[in-house]
Amino acid sequence: MVKYARIALALTICACAERPAVQDSAVEIDPVERQKIYLAQERAQLEAYIKSHELEGVLRNGYGMYELSMAPGQGTPAEFGDAIIYSATVYLLDDSGVGQYTDTVELGRSEMEIGLHESLKGMKKGEKKLVLIPSFLARGLAGDRDKVPPKSPLRYDIRLIQVGR
């Protein structure tokens, strides 16, 4: 009986002994800094695409999108609130096709990608443009759960067919 009491006492003492805290080897990064790092990586990815495809004359706009005019248009530039008809061919940056479609929308008020709204604004009837849109202005964190993977920047070849006020 004494033997069991000694074992119980030893276990109690060991259980109460202070152990050194286990240090987590993962580095904590501030969420804002993490996002800045991701955006810088995506910007480098878009710039590498421009360089590898030798796209001369591409301009970066204030939203972080890259645009290249392919054909001029004519008439009044599209504004938010206009009813427009446009066509688009969409690609991932590995040049695999996502889809091709024609759509009628009210510019600035439909549920299409924010980057696409901004790209179509100011275009004229008949104008063609190549646009590289960062993921946060395209299909976002989730992608489309079909052809567009999460966090994918996209290339749009767009043409404005009609502008209605």
Image (tube, rainbow, N blue to C red):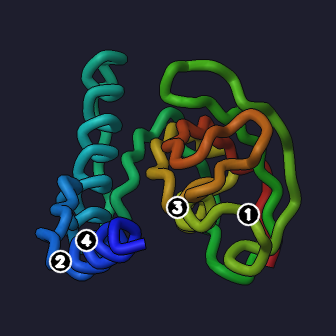
Q: Amino acid at mark 1?
A: Met
Relative to 81, is 128 above or below? Answer: above
Circle 4 or circle 2, nearest the eye: 4
For the residues labelled 3 and 2, the Cα–Cα distance comes to 55 Å
Please identify the quarter of the rendering in which residue 111 is found.
bottom right
Q: Distance from label 3 to label 4 (Cα)? A: 63 Å
Local secondary structure at mark 3: helix
Give the SS element for disc 4: helix
Q: Determine the CA span between mark 1 and mark 4.
A: 68 Å
Residue 139 located left or right of residue 111: left
Q: Which residue is rendered at x = 46% and y = 42% of the image? A: 132
Closer to the N terminus: mark 1 or mark 4?
4
Q: Which residue is mark 1?
A: 112
Provide the residue designation for mark 2.
17
Nearest to N terminus: mark 2 or mark 1: 2
Q: Is tag 1's residue or tag 3's residue first in the polypeptide sequence?
A: 1
**Disc number placed over residue 137 in the picture, else none:** 3
Identify residue type, mark 2. Ala
Residue carrying label 4: 10
Q: Is residue 32 visible?
A: no
- Residue 137 coordinates in the image, percent (x, y): 52, 61
Coordinates of residue 98 in the picture (x, y in percent): 72, 30
Amino acid type, residue under disc 3 in the picture = Leu
Label 4, label 2: how many angstroms apart (C-alpha)? 11 Å
Residue at the spot x=79%, y=73% of the render?
A: 110
Of circles 3 and 2, the one toward us is: 2
Q: Above or below — where is 128 with respect to 60? A: above
**Is tag 3's residue or tag 4's residue first in the polypeptide sequence?**
4
Residue at 79% x, 38% y is: 146
